[in-house]
Image: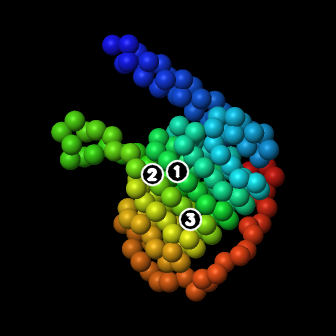
């Protein structure tokens, strides 16, 4: 009984934090938002930015590398570990989940698995990354793709579900991403 009460209070606490972060997401200052996100446990590397209107689930399990740009209206799920590498470009309205219901379980239980996004990855707008997926270094996920399986390094995938399209020609990236717009 006491364990259930404690779990419920913890859930309410994190729902309030998520609500506050949603409000923070409307403030047009990368510096202020990054400061607030770090206060709530998101690990954000040097030079990385998260554009406005981001939604977080359990921020302490989210880690973002350096020089990474994350677009507007993104969903970052930290209910399991979410690791995003260095020099990653994630477009607007991408959803990265690491928790989902097991549709075959008679109790419809939640299944949680880590998601890992490697360095120099580009994820196109409105893509969905599902639990347990690893996107390898230098991979590209096309716009609107639904990624249900691991993506090998330096491959380009697209579609629903995402399938291999071709290999990326650039095999040794060393670029730095451009700076984000000030009021986004």
- Determine the image quadrant of residue 179: bottom right
- Per the model, the C-alpha gap separating discs 3 and 2 is 13 Å
Where is 15 relative to 76, above or below? above
Q: Which mark is residue 118?
A: 3
The residue under the point 58% across, 39% down is 60
- Label 2, residues with CA under 10 Å away: few <14, some 14-19, many ≥20: many
The residue under the point 57% across, 46% down is 62
User: Is 3 displayed left or right of 175 in the figure?
Assistant: left
Q: Nearer the viewer, residue 44 or 163?
A: 44
- The image position of residue 136, as x and y in percent, is 51, 69
User: Is 83 displayed left or right of 147 in the figure?
Assistant: right
List the residue tagged with mark 2. 114
Where is 2 relative to 127, above or below? above
The residue under the point 68% across, 49% down is 44
- The image position of residue 59, as x and y in percent, is 58, 39
Q: Residue furthest front?
A: 3
- Per the model, the C-alpha gap separating discs 1 and 3 is 11 Å
- Label 3, residues with CA under 10 Å away: few <14, some 14-19, many ≥20: many
Earlier residue among tags 1 and 3: 1
Q: Can I make out residue 26 in this image?
A: no
- Determine the image quadrant of residue 161: bottom left
Q: Secondary structure at mark 3?
A: loop
Q: Secondary structure at mark 1?
A: strand
- The image position of residue 33, as x and y in percent, is 73, 41
Q: Residue furthest left?
A: 106
List the residue tagged with mark 1. 82
């Amino acid at each position: 009984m006491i364990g259930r009460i404690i779990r419920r209070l913890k859930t309410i606490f994190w729902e309030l934090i998520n609500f506050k972060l949603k409000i923070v997401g409307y403030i047009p200052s990368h510096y202020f938002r990054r400061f607030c996100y770090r206060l709530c446990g998101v690990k954000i590397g040097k030079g990385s930015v998260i554009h406005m209107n981001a939604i977080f689930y359990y921020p302490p399990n989210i880690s973002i590398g350096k020089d990474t740009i994350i677009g507007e209206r993104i969903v970052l799920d930290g209910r399991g570990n979410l690791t995003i590498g260095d020099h990653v470009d994630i477009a607007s309205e991408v959803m990265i989940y690491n928790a989902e219901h097991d549709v075959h379980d008679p109790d419809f239980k939640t299944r949680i698995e880590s998601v890992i996004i490697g360095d120099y990855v580009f994820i196109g707008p409105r893509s969905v990354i599902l639990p347990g997926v690893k996107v390898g270094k230098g991979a590209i996920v096309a716009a609107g793709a639904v990624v249900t399986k691991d993506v090998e390094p330096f491959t380009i995938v697209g579609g629903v579900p995402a399938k291999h399209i071709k290999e990326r020609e650039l095999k040794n990236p060393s670029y730095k991403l451009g700076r984000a717009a000030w009021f986004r």
